[in-house]
Amino acid sequence: MSHRATNWAIQQRGLAPATKLVLWHLCDRHNPDYGCFPSQDQLAADAEISRASLNTHLDKLEQAGLIRRERRLAEDTKRQRTTRYFLGFEEDFAQKPCPESGHGSTPEPCPDFAKSRVQNLDTNPVSKEPVITTARDAGATREGRADDEGPDLDAAEAACLAACGEGMAPAARAAITATTATIGAWLKAGCDLELDVLPVITERTAKPRGSPIRTWDYFSQAIAARHAKRTALAAKAKHAGEAGAGPAVAPGGPSISPEDRLARLAAWLNSGAYVPPSAVTNTQRDALLRAGLVTEATLRAHQIY
């Protein structure tokens, strides 16, 4: 451990929290006499992220000019050894990059290095974090799930930006990333990325705007309202299921609200009992999905979707 290295890491500004955490753990593994040689497994375990995510954050650090990676081979066997990390405060950081790896000369990794263990997409046994590829995958934080390591805000924000339409101008996209913490607050409050957050963002940025959106907080009230409505409907559906409610009201019985009818229909679908495809209209199907009362998989199981 090098106090000079960790102090230097803490002083860096403008990095995403996860990226700065990786930099700090790199510096924590730095030896003042010998340098920094942690393995990918060790770094991923230290930061409690997957090796795939680790590679992403290392790329960001290298592009920011804070680290430089050098691939090393054993002289006798030519087998790959642990990567040498040069940190920005080190005296030899500015030296010409290793010609074999090429790291440090351009933001792009060298062709040989692309097949190294840095690019290994397996996950470490600490977090089992998924490799984020789509907006659906980014919605990893679900109600009722214990997520000790917290959501990946970089991936969540990428999904939010991908959901934005013409109403999010390029300048606004650049400025809004300064308020990423708001997305974390949504997820910590129990809002679902795919069911609550992304639909609101898509709806509110569908058309060009006269005034730019500058912060993610612009969406907070609408997201909270959608989450509250969805959870209320889900609670009604659960209550209806526990009470053994059927899918419809008996002739001559009391009328029920559209919300209650939708909740009972969801309870019927989620009960596992047979539901004829003709029992659910396209309008009801879409309403059930928007409210988050059933999943596409459940509908497909009933040959409805």
Image (spheres, rainbow, N blue to C red):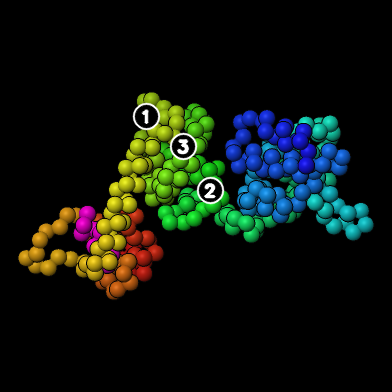
At which x and y percent is residue 12? 67, 31
**Disc 2 packing (10 Å; few <14; some 14–19; many ≥20):** few
At which x and y percent is residue 119? 69, 52
Place residue 221 in its image quadrant: top left
Q: In this view of the protein, which residue sits in the foreground, 48 or 65?
A: 48
Q: Is mark 3 on a helix, strand or loop?
A: helix
Q: Is mark 2 on a helix, strand or loop?
A: loop
Which quarter of the image is occupied by the C terminus? bottom left
Write down the residue under mark 3. 182
Q: Which of marks 2 and 1 is nearer the N terminus?
A: 2
Q: Earlier in the sequence, mark 3 or mark 2?
A: 2
**Number of labelled discs?**
3
Which label is found at residue 254? Answer: none
Position of residue 29 in the picture relative to residue 12 (left or right): right
State how far apart marks 3 and 2 are (Cα).
14 Å
* Magenta stretch in the rendered image: 259-268
State how far apart marks 1 and 3 are (Cα).
22 Å
| Residue that lies at the very extreme toward the right in this rendered image | 76
Which label is found at residue 150? Answer: 2
**Disc 3 packing (10 Å; few <14; some 14–19; many ≥20):** some
Q: Nearer the viewer, mark 1 or mark 3?
A: 3
Write down the residue under mark 1. 209
